[in-house]
Image: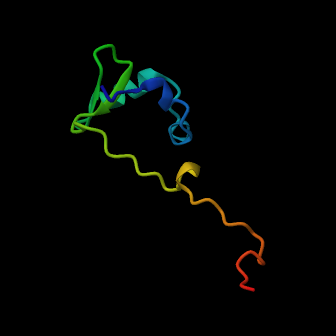
Amino acid sequence: EHFVKLNSFLNCNKVKKLGVTSIKQIIDAVENTENLELNSEKTALRLKTLETLPEFKPKKKLKSEEKPKENGNPYDNLEV
């Protein structure tokens, strides 16, 4: 549970910049860490200390949460 597949790391630009080209390289690096663990098939990893995922807080509001825009007609609010 909460594992990330190793092949998804190969698509990350920062991982590519490090020169990582194979899952074997990731496995070798993760096996020697204290904070990460591999699943039993060695196809995914996760943080050892992560018991539950943190709550997702989007930076932008979803369109469904936005207020409807007011009518752009400036004469709608004039009193007569």
Check the picture and name the quadrant holding the C terminus. bottom right
Residue 51, percent from left and from top: 22, 36
User: Which residue is most to the bottom?
Assistant: 80
Check the picture and name the quadrant holding the N terminus. top left
User: Which residue is most to the front?
Assistant: 80
Q: Residue, x 31% and y 31% (percent of image)?
A: 46
Q: Residue, x 73% and y 82% (percent of image)?
A: 78
Residue 79, percent from left and from top: 71, 85
Residue 54, percent from left and from top: 31, 45
Q: Based on the displayed image, in which of its 4 quarters is residue 43 positioned? A: top left
User: Which residue is most to the top?
Assistant: 41
Q: Based on the displayed image, in which of its 4 quarters is residue 27 positioned? A: top left
Q: Eyeballing the image, is 46 above or below 71?
A: above
Q: Eyeballing the image, is 13 above or below 24?
A: below
Q: Residue, x 56% and y 40% (percent of image)?
A: 13
Q: Residue, x 57% and y 60% (percent of image)?
A: 67
Q: Nearer the viewer, residue 75 or 11?
A: 75
Q: Nearer the viewer, residue 52 or 11?
A: 52
- The coloring applied to the image is rainbow
Q: Eyeballing the image, is 77 above or below 28?
A: below
Residue 28, percent from left and from top: 35, 25
Q: Is residue 69 left or right of residue 35?
A: right
Q: How many marks?
A: 0
Q: Eyeballing the image, is 42 above or below 74?
A: above
